[in-house]
Image: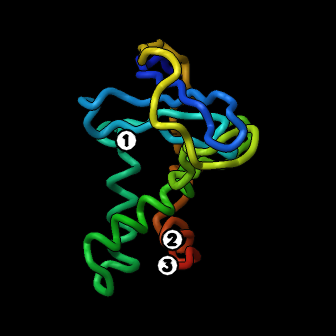
Amino acid sequence: MKTIRLRKEVVRCNECKKTKEFFYLSDFAYGQRLVFFNDSTQMAFVNFIEDKVYNQYIDIVNKVIGEAKSNEEIMEFVQASFGITCDKINNHKVDFLCGQKKCLFCGSDKFERNMIEPESFVNMEVSEITHKTWEKLSEEQKVFEVKKIDFY
């Protein structure tokens, strides 16, 4: 667990009018990201600059699909699939495509534009992304896992 400072915004769902809290890292948090998972009810933190598996994973993806795809397509693939390198958190897979823009009550992704309370900053304890299971795999096993993913 890691304590991080987050910006919090509270808005109202357009459909059911229930409130929703949105959390964001500082605009100056270069290379860091909040990752939402478990149907956007939980979040974790990753610092890609310090995460040694991230660059290794990009290298593997480049070996597997690099020549056939553009750099932009490769990075889209990495973002969509990097979760395979991550350990489960609270028995849930980490999904880098899962966002927080979903009402937990009605499922809508439409929210009012105006905040219903002033923006605030909160310190929250969040899980950190780890890769213990992935790191135990051989290079061949890692390549095999990447090859199993459907590239869209």
> Quick one: quadrant of the N terminus?
top right
| Residue 132 visible in this rendered orientation of the protein | no
Say which residue appears at 52% left-offset and 55% top-offset: 97
Q: Amino acid at mark 3?
A: Phe
List x then y, in percent, for residue 13: 62, 37
| Residue 12 visible in this rendered orientation of the protein | yes
Residue annotated with mark 1: 51
**Structural distance between the alpha carbons of marks 2 and 1:** 18 Å
Say which residue appears at 75% left-offset and 44% top-offset: 106
Q: Amino acid at mark 2?
A: Val
Q: Quadrant of residue 52?
A: top left
Position of residue 102 in the picture relative to residue 123 (left or right): right
Query: At numbered mark 2, what does the secondary structure look like: helix, strand or loop?
Result: helix
Q: Which mark is residue 151?
A: 3
Along the line of sight, the residue nearer the viewer: 20 or 112: 112
Residue annotated with mark 2: 146
Does residue 71 sit above or below 22 in this rendering?
below
Query: At numbered mark 3, what does the secondary structure look like: helix, strand or loop?
Result: loop
Of badges 3 and 2, the one in the foreground is 3
- Say if mark 2 contacts mark 1, CB within 8 Å: no
List x then y, in percent, for residue 117: 50, 16
Q: Earlier in the sequence, mark 3 or mark 1?
A: 1
Q: Quadrant of residue 51?
A: top left
Does residue 15 sit above or below 1 in this rendering?
below
Query: At numbered mark 1, what does the secondary structure look like: helix, strand or loop?
Result: loop
Looking at the image, the residue that sits furthest to the bottom is 68
